[in-house]
Amino acid sequence: MTYLENNGLIEFCKKETEVNDFISGLEQFYINLSTNDLNDKKGLAVRTFNEFLLRLNKRASELLYFENLIFDQPKLELEKMTLKEIQMYFVDKTEGFHQHVYSVISAFAMLLNHIAPREFCQRIPIRKNGKFLKFLKNEYPKLIDFIKILELSTSFRNKFIDHTQQHVLHDWMTYSYPENNQAKAVVIYFIKNSNNVYQREERNPFSLNFQPPINCKEHYISPYYKDVYKSLLVIVEYIITEMGEAIKNQLPLKTPPTA
């Protein structure tokens, strides 16, 4: 059983509307440990990281909106947009989301570098996200499955967003599929052999037997954004909680207001 299941966070993470409460809770946790000095580096690191999380929440909400539009023809007509336009927006929001996930990972390394116990800080590799995630896997074996999902996101970002000049040119298509009584959408990047289109039996793009509904010699599936987002929240919550007592011992408590 995973940490996520053990702690009942699956149901929590399914409710995207609770993400703001989650972030606010983290912020209050930090505030209670920090000082009143606005120039305090630890306090600034806390606020900066929370701003990164809030912006990621906004990006996830935008992506959810366009994902739903793909399946909602009446609303699509109401918005006066064509399906092609929605697909372009969905690809744009997908790539923007994973780009910002990369930034949040960097911001999390920055946060831990400022608030974690000194012995921990001295071992954090903060120059490269890949090394930082590898470090977290070694430090927190219970989180390996979630960290691997973040690694899929950073790999996607490196290959299809930031360093396209280093890779073979791919075409793309949006792809929708049903799962657990809900519709999901991803972006498939592929190298086309021909324009032939097929009806495939396997619909889940993350199945080992999946093949895109088009004749191609290779393909790549964008990591599903909700899985990435939930994994990120679980990792942050677990690590901050795990080192909570150590942080309390290092940071001065916030001084209560005087009458």
Image (cartoon, helix red, strand yellow):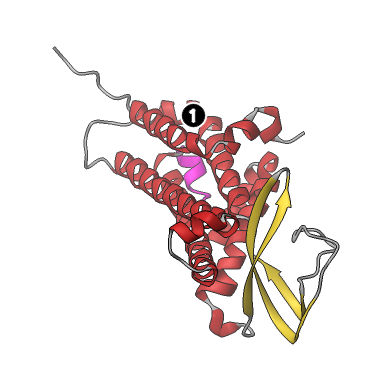
At which x and y percent is residue 31? 33, 30
Which residue in the rendered view is the most extreme toward the left? Answer: 259
Read off the magenta span. 117-125
Packing grade of label 1 (10 A; few <14, some 14-19, many >=20) is: some
Residue at figure coordinates x 50%, y 41% from the top left? 119
Lateral position of residue 253 relative to residue 167, left or right: left
At which x and y percent is residue 235? 58, 42
Please name the residue that numbered disc 1 is placed on. Answer: 244
* Amino acid type, label 1: Gly
Q: Is residue 12 magenta?
A: no
Tell me the element at label 1. Answer: helix
Which residue in the rendered view is the most extreme toward the bottom? Answer: 194
Residue at figure coordinates x 41%, y 28% from the top left? 29
At which x and y percent is residue 126? 48, 57
Circle count: 1
Camera-nearest residue between 55 and 146 = 55
